[in-house]
Amino acid sequence: MKKKLALLLAAAMVMGSLTGCGGSGSGSDSSGAASDSGQAAAAEDEEVDPRFKYDEPVTLTSYFEISPAIMNDWDQEEAMNSVYYQRMTEETNISIDWLWFAANTADDSQQKKSVAIASGEIPDFMIVNSSQLSLLAKSDLINRDIGKIFEKYATEELMSWTTGEGDAALESASYDGQTIAIPLVDSSIDAAPMMWIRRDWIEKLNLEMPKTMEDLYNVMIAFRDQDPDGNGQDDTIGMVFHNNFLSAGLGDAVGLFDAFGAYPTIWVQDGNGGLKYGSIMEENKDALNYIAKMYQEGLIDQDFSSNDEVKASEAAASGRAGIQYGLMWNANWPLNSTVQNDINADWVAIPLPSATGEEARPQISPVINGYVVVSKKCEHPEAVVRLLSFWVDKFGYSGDEYNDYLVEDANGVLNFPQHWVMLKTWFPLKNLTAAQSIWEAMDSGDSSKLNAEQLAYYNDIQTYLGGDVVTGYGSMKTFGNDMSAFQTIEHYYNDDLFMVNEFTTGPTPTMGQKMSTITDKVMEYYTKVIMGIETTDSFDDFVNEVNALGLEKITEELNEWYTSK
Amino acid sequence: MEKKKKKSISTIMKTEWPLHVLLLPAMILLIIFAYLPMVGIVISFQDFVPSGGMKGFFTSEWVGLENFRYIFAMKDFRQVLVNTLVIAILKIAAGIIVPLILALLLNEVNNRAFKKATQTIIYVPYFLSWVVLGGILVDILSPTSGIVNSALKALGHEPVYFLGNPDTIRGTLIVSDVWKGCGYNMVIFLAALTGIDQSQYEAAKVDGAGYFKQMLYITLPGILPQIILVTVLGLGNILNAGFDQVFNLYSPIVYEKADIIDTFVYRLGMLNLQYSVSTAVGLFKSVISFVLITSSFALAKKFANYQIF
Amino acid sequence: MKVKSSPARKVFVVINYIVLTLVMFISLFPLVHIFALSLSSNSAAQAGWVTVLPVNFTLDSYKYILEKPEVFKAFGISVLRVVLGTIISVGLTIISAYAMSQPDERFHARKYYVWVFLITMIFSGGLIPQFIVVKSVGIYNTIWALILPTAVQTFNVILMLNFFRGLPYALTESALIDGANHFQIMARIVVPISKPSLATVGLFTMVNHWNSWFDGMIYLSDTSKYPLQTYLRNVIQSVDVASLDLNSVGAMTNVSQKTVTAAQIFVAIIPILMVYPLLQKYFISGMTLGSVKE
């Protein structure tokens, strides 16, 4: 995996510099490629200019999902009339008719999509999750040639981003050997679990950074009992924990399971050439017993099972907890708010402590933010590919033009308005590359090679180092050179530690139907063990139960695919 | 029947046509928004695959009773059924007893201002949506920072994890439901109480009946129709254990005790995309409700001589 | 009617007042708590220090939402929905309940209509077919989608027809014999003396409309058309953390402001606190009518 990534990184960098102003010429016209509106998907082998412009205006219908991150400041007019959309229409002659706007939550957006799919009235293009995709795969609603169209019309950059971590992304969108959707990829290594810990507390109590799970236990006990915040009250806990602990993000326990060599929720090799489901591995027992002990001894909140991530992490933000598992962005939010209450709060990222004597292997999965399906009724399926290419050009390679698109967010920081764009995909190594460039610039003092995004982080870090800890906190802790998140990720990356999910195809038939029941069951059983309602003695019964619920069938189906791969 | 009364259709229509006209708007709306969608019930006998609009209802593969076999084989479904019945029955019982007691207590208050204030205030939670209350309850019931548990701790009691423990979730649902809704039934009962002819009490006092006897022989019979109405309508709703409330308060850890038919149907259909199975569960619920409602109406007529509809 | 009180009676009265006062406190506590939260500093709120009084008093939350037009827009939509929805629904309830309140001998087709109403109370095609219908009727993404599908409430029809049945039979019978038709009787006799009970059913309808959030999410495509409860649901809803990445989290700082949420909730409650006491006088007498039987 690592080699592949490195190769692609090199390739993409070269392409980046070659096409540095690829999209800037708004006059880079069609050269007849897209021809007349009706005739777009012309002959198969015809060479096309992927940066074509339609002669006639083309309108695509879709829907808009408002990210919770911008919900509070959402201004429809502003977003839809932004420079990004103006240029998009200028350069491609494509505009989008948004049929609906919804918050990106299970109840709002997912439900609207569910209803739209069931009623068979899908817009020209829409972004769906894998279970929605598997239902659509059976229907007659979508254009099944989109894979071929994508191959034909995608720019090299778009293609390299999409296949940045191998073919897994495109494979996962295939059904009966045909790619029926365009995967929107994201970085998998950015989603590697790590540990966030308060260095100021460690130092104050004369402790060492934990390397083993035993160390960790002792640190948690100390954090709980020795009044690390020095307020004279017994108000601190060992670690942040919540009810959604198998979902890597914020205060979860994925990194803790990994420490024991257990990889819940992902599919790993079973040692006999096949795959097995990580949630039923024997190793989970040790991890569960460890957490159950934490629960019993009050190292985690007793009401964790009613707290979601945001609620649980208030403990860290408010200075009640000094340890949490999480992802690289945690310092940007919510850990950054700790420092608003306590100027000395010094969160640092460290690699996962281990229980096995070997280095813990953080589990990651190919990250696909969604699948773009195109309606069968859409007359210009290639326009969807064109819009994706447009995004890649502008976000990735637009040079100085990049600055034209920036908008101020709620905190007064200039950002590329990525939340205003639905059709977007990412270069998997973008952030690690950014971090490395920043470290280089910090060493040399020369920031001229940094791109606009990197420069913004760099400037934040300078602000932090200049004494304004609060403003620059997130960037320093994420991209800085003092125990930052990306130093941990680079360590994982250089030592090739990632445990990668082997499941890279579309959902199997039984999976689409039963998987959610199984994951519910897993959560229920794990939670009970942690709360002491059950013990790991019943682990075998639990395994039998989930197998009966369909996991056995799913494993069979999956191995059929895996062995034939 | 018309023949028996020896009236011809035309004579009947002559006086009764305005009644048909009055019902016309409601009938049109019901046909469009209630009866037309019922076509969709067919997908509970299909393996539904969507296809433009209503078309999918006719093009999907028929699977007979397969979906029903599937749900009855599902362990979760049986549990959901039990949950629904237990929660609903307890809610109905508590939702009558508590408001009745409050109404009787309030009826004894002579201070008009106090009476009015109490009534107004007790009714207030009824107006809050479960969206809002869900957020508030999670806060105040938290074992670590919630005010309720702070009070328990002050009394030397272990914190109780109301929303996250399968043992307490049903109690929490019922108490919070009564808390929110008791104003509704209380006002119905109170109105009936004020409607009782005061001369009956005067007469009873002359006969030397005490407060207790007055309550037993005048007050309770006086509001019996309301109690029956509320009970019977409640019984008909026995499979509706309160989607809004449960949806805003439950979490996976308490599914085994708190997941009810409606939330189950919602998750199956909207999140797991098992449209056919979810419709089958809904149909099952409707059939049972149909029997319950019609028989409870008949019961009301028979035992209380009260014609609800 | 004043009678001498026995000592036992006096004790009862005192306990009664205490119990009812306690009940009042319990009923109001969450509101007070939310109000206190909305006036507290965010850090105090996060730390769970706020009970019934604000901690570190500040008006920041209200300043913040005053600058946000969305809340007030959603508020306005809710008000419009309540007004339109209540007028239409109560109107339909009156005319339907009047017809259905007629005894079988005055309305021979009545028993068939009973079934038409009853079945809709029980059977439903489910969300998907309802959505398809709303869309094909052309009211999708309009306020009518929140009003028309639920305009006929069988439950309210039942309530009101029982009020109407409570009216003296002779009142309408003599009018019928005098040759008045049903329209006249309904408009001139029944409705005027039923005003209080109409207010009662009206209030229930208003509350239902005010509190509905689910249909807003299904039938409205535009978040800017959401009524207040649907809007709030999105604000209160927990965030799907798994979907966050580096680029989204910066703005999250604003989302987790418990105090702002509390302020928004409180704003949503204010109109209720203002309107409900005004309607109360009708309310009680409205209920009374239903119980005057025979």
Image: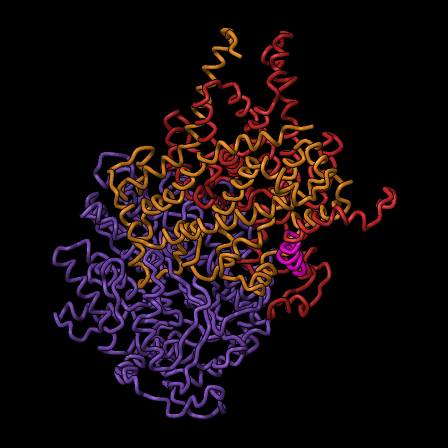
Chain colours: A purple, B red, C orange
Position of residue A527 measured from the top left corner of the image (x, y, whole percent)? 47, 46
Q: Quadrant of the N terminus of chain A?
A: bottom left
Residues C271 and A362: in front is: C271
Q: On the picture, is A23 further left or further right than C270?
A: left
Query: Relative to B241, is A102 above or below?
Result: below
| Residue numbers of the magenta segment | B26-41
Do we see residue A525 in this rendering?
no
Residue at image point 82% right, 50% down: B9
Q: Is residue B286 toward the left or the right of residue A321 in the image?
A: right
A312 with respect to B169 (left or right): left
* Residue nearer the viewer, A377 or A400: A377
Task: Pinpoint residue A411: horizontal percent, then vertical percent.
Answer: 24, 58
Is B166 colored magenta in this rendering? no
Q: Main secondary structure of the magenta part?
A: helix
Q: Is residue A266 left or right of residue B58?
A: left
* Any part of residue C53 in sight: yes
| Residue A26 in which image quadrant | bottom left
Q: How many marks?
A: 0
Q: Is residue B220 above or below residue A316?
A: above
Residue toward you, C2 or A336:
C2
Q: Position of residue B309 (x, y in %)?
A: 70, 40
Residue C156 falls in image quadrant: top right
Residue B6 place in picture, x, y as percent: 87, 44
